[in-house]
Amino acid sequence: MAAGALALAASPGDAPIRAMRWAARSVDPVAAFDRAPAECLRRSRDPAEALKVEVGRAAFRTPVLLGGQAARAGVNCETCHKGGRTNPDFLFPGVSGAPGTADVTDSLFSTHRGDDVMDPKPIPDLSGPRAKLKVDQARGAHKLEPFIHGLITEEFDGPEPPKAVLQGIAEYVRHLSPDACPKTASVPVTPAYFMSDVRRALAAAQGEIAAGDAPAAILMIASARTRLGLIDERYAGAALAPLRAELRAADARLAQAQQALRDHRPGVAAELTAWLADSARLEARIEARAPASLFDPQRLTQAARRRLPG
């Protein structure tokens, strides 16, 4: 899967799910990984603008956007900004000081901005009050897109993003707002939670295919594959091997779609439509076995305890 998202069964001492690698071992696994912050995203009624937001939302959720060391580690924008918010549990060796902080000029991820000075700062809440954010998000200010471009290509040494993706991330960030926060502060992390992201990313891919932007569509599919990987890693163990095989077969179809776009072959939009139609049956089988997976809070807690010293 994209960016090495497929997980192998964890051995004692390993993080049972990838996100635990950059969280303090003392973190309550149920509080941190069984629920996620509710997304504070304003919906746009303009179809073109809505597509941009969805493109940005998907790009925000895949390490492929950042490339380099970040992609190898499985880090994406949402790693620090869960659900477009902040991440008080983030603790990455060499990057963080206290939990919830990051040094944006570290040399681990960046050869451009690394200054060999450890000065981590609190991770901002992108859905918080605009006055607390350091970059003016107004379109007329023309500051947000260059700022995001610098984050990708300099702070993380990432590849040049497709124009539609850069614009999309800016629109996604602009549409995050405290006024759009739902009454419920968090939502359960379930297979359906990730499958919704998969479908939204593939819908964005179809939009970019229709627009003739294959590079942006390829990145959207990468995001879908990343989210599939987050399902896969929770189905460790021999008893769930058949289901993992189904997930990996579904991922392989998406990998083929990406390659078809690279090769300029026709029919990718139709293949994604077929994949989406088949996804309902796959999701039903995944949900049926969720109690035997790390989506079950008790099993997640037990798996987390096995990696603690002693």
Image: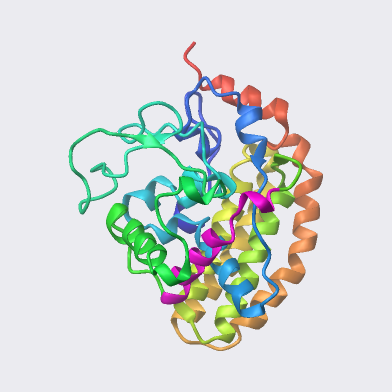
> Could you say which is closer to the camera, residue 129 or residue 165?
129
Residue 264 among those drawn in magenta:
no
Residue 172 among those drawn in magenta:
yes
Whether residue 5 is visible to the viewer of this picture, yes or no, is no
- How far from the left and from the top, in percent, is residue 222? 51, 64
Which residue ends up furthest to the left in the rendered image? 116
Highlighted range, magenta: 163-181
Answer with left or right where residue 274 lies relative to residue 132: right
**Residue sitting at x 47%, y 25%:** 24
> Could you say which is closer to the camera, residue 288 or residue 83?
83
- How far from the left and from the top, in percent, is residue 34? 67, 35
**Please, what is the dominant secondary structure of the magenta stretch?**
helix
- How far from the left and from the top, in percent, is residue 193? 70, 50
- How far from the left and from the top, in percent, is residue 162? 41, 74
Whether residue 31 is visible to the viewer of this picture, yes or no, is yes
Answer with left or right where residue 298 lies relative to residue 112: right
